[in-house]
Amino acid sequence: MKKEVYRRGIPGKKFGIWNTEKGSWDLDVCEDTPMLANARLYQKIGDAAKNRKYEPRILPGRKGAEKT
């Protein structure tokens, strides 16, 4: 992921935390940038977030739809 996208995100898109081992979304994280999604992950689970199985990804949804 490019630094610009990591820090500033993509306009109109939300990011969540994807669990690569389970193949599903985890922890109900919905943030504007991948950096904020990672910060929220660390808030919720602490040092266990260093595990490589978690990664920020763009949440699926219709264009312009807001996730809450």
Image: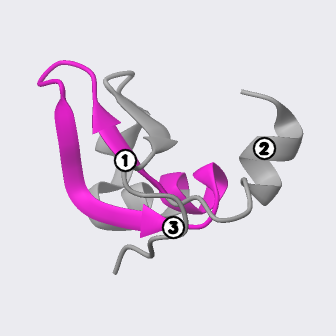
| Residue 45 found in image quarter | bottom left
Mark 2 lies on residue: 5
- What segment carries the magenta color? 15-38
Q: Do callouts 2 and 3 mark residues in contact (Cβ within 8 Å)?
A: no
Q: Name the residue tied to disc 3.
A: 31
Q: Residue at x 18, y 18 (%)?
A: 21
> Label 2, label 3: how many angstroms apart (C-alpha)?
13 Å
In the rendered image, which quarter contains the N terminus? Answer: top right
Q: Nearer the viewer, residue 54 or 16?
A: 16
- At x 58%, y 58%, the residue is 13
Q: Is residue 49 left or right of residue 7?
A: left
The quadrant in which residue 50 appears is top left
Q: Secondary structure at mark 3?
A: strand
Based on the displayed image, in which of its 4 quarters is residue 40 positioned?
bottom left
Q: Nearer the viewer, residue 42 or 4?
A: 4
Q: Position of residue 7 (x, y in %)?
A: 79, 53
Q: Residues within 10 Å of mark 2 (few under 14, many from 20)?
A: few
- Residue at the right extreme of this rendering: 4
Label 3 vs label 1, nearer the camera = 1
Give the image location of residue 55, x and y in percent. 44, 33
* Residue wearing tag 1: 60
The mark nearer the N terminus, 2 or 3, is 2
Q: CA distance from mark 1 to mark 2?
A: 17 Å
